[in-house]
Image: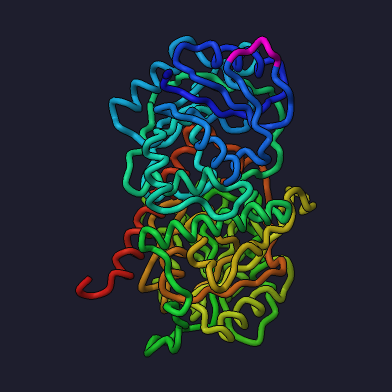
């Protein structure tokens, strides 16, 4: 018997049938299973259609495993068409056998017309638990290990879209996931515009069923690896002890070279209407474009505005937050405002502080609306993170890429944690740390206008930069999972 069975789905376009002919004609492929309802030409040998519904459903996976007897299963998930070279299958099989991996994947090329660009992928690590981890379009599974983990941990829950996610998590617990750091194939794409913030898919109401499935699967994974935290372990902040604060709240604005937006951000903070005392702390990270002069001019007229220029010159956004958080100027509550964004109205600060007080929360996260430079709403619009639940949000936070904004903290608690001195992921790391110990409050009305413009940190990233960011957040998740496992073991275990 040949070592490979292939599972794919019908893809429209001129590249699908040639790829199918190549796979079904390969001396390494025993059979090709196409999930869908479209007929396949009789001229393509050893190729069958599976009309089982969703590509990643539990039923589809059950039918596939009942049918195949091959050593390996090659999954080609729904995506753009794939162009496979003459030695691609041999190379990925060789790597899987030499490493004994349960799952093997490789880098690839993005091919658009006559352009061919390397698309490297990240290594897999224990914290690579998000459901959208990019394995590319050729994923080789060791069939023996697949059957073994399903026998040990049981089949997936009754899911329509998440059985492969469930399988991947189970396989990764005790088995190698191997990344081939060479491009072995191409993904054929067309030049097209961005389709509107794909990294917000988990908050899109249209994806609610899918995301609930993913959360169910992920929660099961955390329980299997001893990292699931029951909600009753979380605590409220209680009193802040003997610490005294100059004001009740501080709006903290880290900034570097934002002369075009910082004044608007500061004014939106200064004009907050509250019944309590507050100040605005701008941590100016050695701006060189005139930002410093703008802040100094505003501070000369506004006593509430505190202008800090750190002595250190190696600070990221997290380091700037620490400068404000640990200063004598900081209030009992520390509330975020980015230097290119705005509070939506003068009542935002009061709403946030009321929520912090009433719930004795260590952290409160609000909601925001994405707008352009003219403050006009643009897709996806309101980001309110309604996927959060009080019972399981602190666990599901490890699966998703962020908790939302604006973020606000109990200063006494946050001083025990601090921020990582980086400019990406510092807020996510802090939030995971907090929700391992404390309850987090949520506000689902829009408090914040998040401006998208060509110069801000949310502008389109290169593949390398996006990979670096994703790998860093995966490392944060890895560390957080280890901390939760250790905490749940308890003394003497």
Q: Where, by quadrant of the figure, is residue 144 drawn?
A: top left
- The magenta region covers 41-45
412 above or below 262? below
Q: As drawn, is 407 to the left or to the right of 129?
A: right
Give the image's coloring scheme.
rainbow
One can see residue 170 in this view: yes
Does residue 328 show up magenta in the picture?
A: no
Q: How many marks?
A: 0
Which of the two residues, 414 or 18, is positioned nearer the viewer here?
18
Front-most of 420 and 214?
214
Residue 322 placement, left or right of 57: left
State whether residue 362 is above or below residue 292: below
Q: Main secondary structure of the magenta part?
A: loop
The residue positioned 42% from the left and 60% from the top of the image is 222
Q: Residue at x 62, y 70 (%)?
A: 301
In the image shown, does 384 or 87 lie closer to the viewer? 87
Q: Residue at x 52, y 70 (%)?
A: 306
- Can you give x and y, in whole percent of width and height, for residue 370 in the image? 71, 53
Position of residue 383 measured from the top left corner of the image (x, y, whole percent): 68, 58
Question: Residue at left 55%, top 48%?
Answer: 257
Please give left or right for residue 75 compared with residue 176 in the image: right
Quarter of the C terminus within the rendering:
bottom left
Against 131, residue 249 (above or below) is below
Task: Locate the N terminus and report the quarter of the image it occupies.
Answer: top left
Query: Which of the 4 quarters of the picture holds residue 312?
Result: bottom left
């Amino acid at each position: 018997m040949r070592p490979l069975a292939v599972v794919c789905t019908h893809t429209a376009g001129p590249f699908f049938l040639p790829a199918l002919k190549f796979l079904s004609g390969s001396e390494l492929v025993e059979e090709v299973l196409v999930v869908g309802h479209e007929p396949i030409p009789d001229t393509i040998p050893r190729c069958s259609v599976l009309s089982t519904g969703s590509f990643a459903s539990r039923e589809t996976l059950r039918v596939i495993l009942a049918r195949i007897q091959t050593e390996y299963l090659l999954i080609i998930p729904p995506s753009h068409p794939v162009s496979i070279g003459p030695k691609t299958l041999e190379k990925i099989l060789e790597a899987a056998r030499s490493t004994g991996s349960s799952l093997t994947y490789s880098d690839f090329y993005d091919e658009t017309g006559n352009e061919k660009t390397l698309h490297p992928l990240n290594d897999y690590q224990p914290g690579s638990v998000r459901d959208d981890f990019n394995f590319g379009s050729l994923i080789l599974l060791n069939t023996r290990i697949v059957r073994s983990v399903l026998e040990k941990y049981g089949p997936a829950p009754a899911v329509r879209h998440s059985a492969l996610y469930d399988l991947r998590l189970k396989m990764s617990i005790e088995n190698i996931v191997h990344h081939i750091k060479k491009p072995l194939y191409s993904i054929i794409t067309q030049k097209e515009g961005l389709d509107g913030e794909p990294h917000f898919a988990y908050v899109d109401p249209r994806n609610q069923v899918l995301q609930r499935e993913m959360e169910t699967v992920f929660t099961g994974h955390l329980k299997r690896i001893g990292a699931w935290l029951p909600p009753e372990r979380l605590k409220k902040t209680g009193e802040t002890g003997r610490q005294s604060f100059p004001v009740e709240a501080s709006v903290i604005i880290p900034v570097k070279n934002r002369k075009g937006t910082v004044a608007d951000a500061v004014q939106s903070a200064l004009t907050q209407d509250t019944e309590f005392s507050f100040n605005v702390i701008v941590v100016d990270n050695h701006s060189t474009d005139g930002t410093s002069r703008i802040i100094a001019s505003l501070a000369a007229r506004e006593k509430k505005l505190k202008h800090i220029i750190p002595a250190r010159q190696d600070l990221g956004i997290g380091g700037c937050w620490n400068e404000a958080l640990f200063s004598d100027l900081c209030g009992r509550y520390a509330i975020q405002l980015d230097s290119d964004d705005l509070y939506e109205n003068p009542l935002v600060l009061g709403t946030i502080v009321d929520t912090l007080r009433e719930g004795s929360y260590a952290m409160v996260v609000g909601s925001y609306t994405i707008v352009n430079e003219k403050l006009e709403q643009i897709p996806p619009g309101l980001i309110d993170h309604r996927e959060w639940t009080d019972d399981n949000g602190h666990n599901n936070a490890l699966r998703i890429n962020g908790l939302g904004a604006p973020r606000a903290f109990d200063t006494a608690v946050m001083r025990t944690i601090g921020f990582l001195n980086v400019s990406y992921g510092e807020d996510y790391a802090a939030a995971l740390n907090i929700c391992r110990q404390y309850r987090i409050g949520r506000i689902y009305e829009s408090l914040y206008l998040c401006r998208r413009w060509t110069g801000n940190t949310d502008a389109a990233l290169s593949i390398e930069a996006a990979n670096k960011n994703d790998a860093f957040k995966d490392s944060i998740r890895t560390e957080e999972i280890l901390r939760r496992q250790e905490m749940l073991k308890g003394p003497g275990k």
